[in-house]
Each structure stands twice: as C-alpha cells, then as structure tokens.
Image: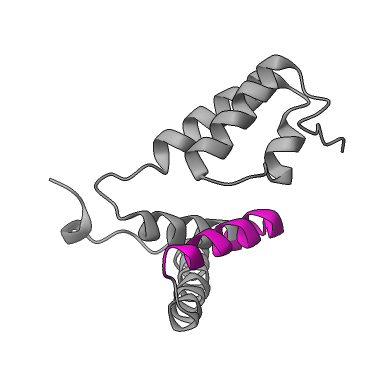
Amino acid sequence: MALISYEEASPEVRAVYDDIMETRQVDRVNNFWLGLAVDPPTLRRTWESVKEVMAPGALDPLVKELLYVAVSVTNGCEYCIASHTASARKKGMTDEQLAELLAVVGMANETNALATGYGVPVDEAFRRD
C-alpha cells in the first residue's frame, strides 16, 4: 500500500494532516493516516469520526483507549492494537491493566462463542424494559 507523505500530499490531505498533528499534539502523522490519504474523502471522514468519538465525553479517555484495544485484539488488527496500546499507555495504562484487559477480552470471546454455539437464550431479567 502506498503511504502519502506530508511533502507529496495535496493541500486537502495536508489540511487533515495538520489537524491530526495539532489535535494530537504530535510532530508526525502515523502510517494509518498516511495510508488512508490515497483516498482523501475517506481520510477526512475517518479523521473527523475518530476525533469526535475519541474526544472526552461520558467515558474517560483512557477507558475509550482500553475499549479500542479490546476490540482491536478481538478483530486481530495488529496496527490498531499497537497504536491504541501506545495511546492507552500515554493516558496512564499500566502493565497490570493491560494484562487484566486481555484476560477479560479472552474470557469474553470464549463465553460469547459458547453462548452462541449452544444457542443459550437470553434471560428475561437481562432484557431492557
């Protein structure tokens, strides 16, 4: 896959890169964004969505990163695991928290598969009113 460097980027792509660097307070754009830049509308749309979803809100920023790591592990996305583990560490995640998170992810995947495979019906008490 081609990566579009800042120097070879169009003005539209550079504007997104600049926003990424300013928002994240970093001096470089990572490969995920450089790869998406082959399609500027996808780059722009994805960045705007990530920026909105990962912004502080009802969930603590570290919790959001932990959730991102959990889903990335389940989906097997090496890039996202590395990227969001690094982000979670910057937000204070410890080795113990990562180990516990991975244990929960592994257990959830196992019990999800068992419940699905056995066709276990959902208890009425668990259903929303």
Q: Position of residue 70 (x, y in %)?
A: 50, 62
**Residue at 45%, 73% in the rendered image:** 101
**Residue at 40%, 54% in the rendered image:** 64
Residue placed most toward the observer, 25 or 126: 25
Rendered position, 21 above or below 41: below
Q: Position of residue 117 (x, y in %)?
A: 52, 64
Asked whether residue 78 is drawn in magenta, I would say yes
Instruction: Specify the segment rendered in magenta.
Output: 73-92
Whether residue 88 sits left or right of residue 8 in the image: it is: left
Whether residue 51 sits left or right of residue 9 in the image: it is: left
Number of numbered tags placed on the structure image? 0
Q: Position of residue 88 (x, y in %)?
A: 48, 63
Q: Position of residue 5 (x, y in %)?
A: 80, 34
Q: Quadrant of the C terminus?
A: top left
Rendered position, 40 above or below 111: above
Q: Residue furthest left?
A: 129
